Image (spheres, rainbow, N blue to C red):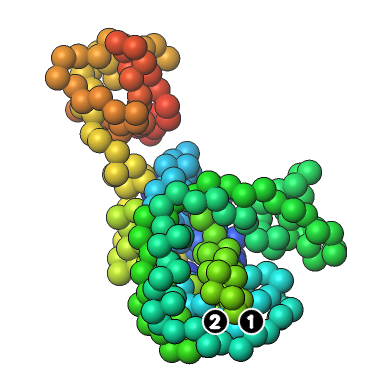
Amino acid sequence: MLEGLLIVDKPIGLTSHDVVQQIRRLSHIRRVGHAGTLDPLATGVLVVCLGRATRLIEYVMGQPKMYLGTVRLGQTTDSYDAEGEINQTWPVTVTQEEIAAALPSFRGRIAQVPPRYSAIKKGGQPVYKLARQGIVVDLPARPVTIYELELVEWQPPDLTLRVVCSAGTYIRSLAHDLGEQLGCGGHLVALRRTAVGVMTVDAAAKLSALNPDNWPAALLAPEAAVAHLPRLDLTPVQADMLTQGQRPLREPGQPSALLLRGYDERSGFLGVFSPWQDRWQVEKLMPPLS
């Protein structure tokens, strides 16, 4: 049974769900999911998990993301991006120096209000559906971390930013908030995700190039989803106990971290584990296929 990760370079105009549906059709695998939504406006790295690898989606989603985003100053939209309706305009007189001076306040751990047109749910409904019905939902600010933020290009009224950020960060909100701070408004007009963790767009497959014959060649092993976690080599006794729902003792010299990817010398990748007092416990089990 084929299973694992496909790193897809999502084209503009498709939803992430559209990509999943295409992968499902060409692979004939029903269990397919993506690890982090990209809006139709956005392109770039979309990690698609197939088969049992869908059990590891949460570990991909939690990794830092890298983006190149283009912000158009002088206009705001109701969706914070070019897909929305323009609601205000201002003249743009800011300088490159003023833009650079505004960026430090957005670096590090910040409180960010998500866009009203987002997939966040309120009362069981995605708020973008409520927004389309004219229902205004005030979303609370959420903590996110922007590890790196730099100005790549300034061609008035457009500026391009390189952003490395935590999961849950909205680049649309960053564009809107930066425009507000500069006093001229702004919205996102282009976005490309260039990396998810160590998975980069350079290694991504073009969706249009995948077909029923060649897609398996682009498939990564399920353990690629947790390659960023420290490696734990389990003894046969530990591996057997863990697969039977028991907590084996930790051996001297075995590494310790909040999460580790575990291996059994007989069958390879076994899953994700964590220390529990002086023992190991299962976080996500990936026993070998029988």
Q: Is residue 198 above or below residue 162?
A: above
Examine the rendering and report whether any part of residue 207 can be seen: no
Q: Residues within 10 Å of mark 1 (few under 14, many from 20)?
A: many
Q: Is residue 216 above or below residue 85?
A: above
In the picture, the disc for residue 72 is 2
Residue at left offset 19%, top offset 14%: 251
Label 2 to label 1, Cα distance in Å? 7 Å
Residue at left offset 85%, top offset 64%: 134
Q: Quadrant of residue 179?
A: bottom right
Dot 1 falls on a residue whose secondary structure is strand
- Residue linked to disc 1: 75
Residue 80: % across, % down:
63, 70
**Amino acid of disc 2:** Arg
* CB-based contact (under 8 Å), mark 2 and mark 1: yes
Residue at left offset 23%, top offset 18%: 236
Is residue 39 or residue 225 the one in the foreground? Answer: 39
Is residue 222 or residue 128 the one in the foreground? Answer: 128
